Amino acid sequence: MPTAVAPSTTNWNELADRVLDGYQLTPEEAVAILRSPDEELLDLLAAAYRVRRHYFGKTVQLYFLMNAKSGLCPEDCSYCSQSKVSDAEIPRYNLLNREKLMAGAAAAAERQAKTYCIVISARGPSEREIKAIETIVPEIKQKYGLQICACLGLLTPDQADRLAACGVNKVNHNLNTSAEQYGNICSTHTYQDRVDTLKAVRTAGMELCSGGIVGMGEQPRDVVSMAIELRDLGVESIPVNFFNPIEGTPLAGPTELTPNYCLKVLAMFRLVNPDRELRIAGGREMHLRSLQPLGLYAANSVFVGDYLTTKGQLPESDYAMLRDMGFEVTTSVEAETARAAANA
């Protein structure tokens, strides 16, 4: 874990003031957050919450994820249970049919999710998969009013245009780590390939959803580099995953993540990207543990339900946590309209 330094506790409030005035953190200031002593964690979170509250009040957005195609991936991402180098015991299946995708949308709506995430394991989508998404997205939006986030791997400009045309709101494609660290976790595509996909999505007019995974052997400077790159790319939605070392993957084994460090990561992302949607994603249950509620003083979004090949906590536990904290779940206007029509 990073060696702690000792800024004064008043500096965090001063830093929040500057961020709210439009100041952009330097890499050195962001690294100092990750290296700060645990004794200052509550002061740091209070500063992050001031920024979060300014832009999002006490609202929380929920996301629901559907693993629409599992395993069978030709890429060698060493953290991923679905990659070609993984021996993890996971379900393997091709793209789910219409009925199962619609059932997932129904579950997303029932769980008060604002966004339904359709994810496939692949280097990039096939023509058949693109056509399936083009067909199902308008139906989901018409019936449930959900925002749609598609995570389909690397995209060409033409594919991005087609997703935008059928009503996809945003595309998820994570940077995962820094440019300098990327070669240590994947060799079958590059960091630049991922950036190029995000640029194609932006050109097509959709919002960007991109974040990363913390705890894969990187240094604090790598986490900071990723956060700043996401800021420079103008990413609207940032999921922060905490590495879950799944047995059978090359990176399986103990991690050095602690709840306190994970909270510092979230605070750093908030202060670097003050007005962006920040989501606590995979691994929160494992690594934040009993401190999960504190993460929402920096983040304003969570997944409700399971992840790709790992389980999340029960939705009822998430709802109770949000109620206890006094947070309000927000959904899209379209979803509220669809729900009212269904109950009429």
Image (cartoon, helix red, strand yellow):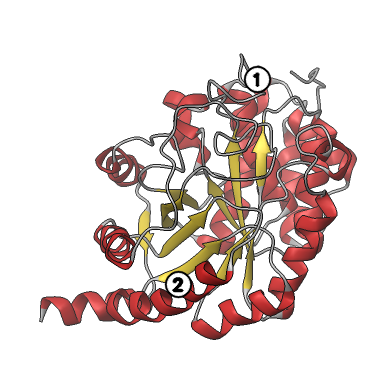
Circle 1: is it few (<14), some (14-19), or many (20+) Cα within 10 Å? few
Q: Is residue 118 left or right of residue 257?
A: left
The answer to which image quadrant residue 153 occupies is bottom right
The answer to which image quadrant residue 216 occupies is top right
Residue closer to the observer: 95 or 305: 95
Judged from this view, the residue extending furthest toward the bottom is 165
Which element type, helix, strand or loop, lies under badge 2? Answer: helix
The answer to whether residue 186 of the structure is visible from this angle is yes
Residue ID at (46%, 60%): 118
Which label is found at residue 181? none
Q: Amino acid at mark 2?
A: Ala
Q: Position of residue 271 (x, y in %)?
A: 71, 49
Q: Quadrant of the N terminus?
A: top right
Q: Quadrant of the C terminus?
A: bottom left
Q: Residue tagged by mark 1?
A: 39
Which label is found at residue 132? 2
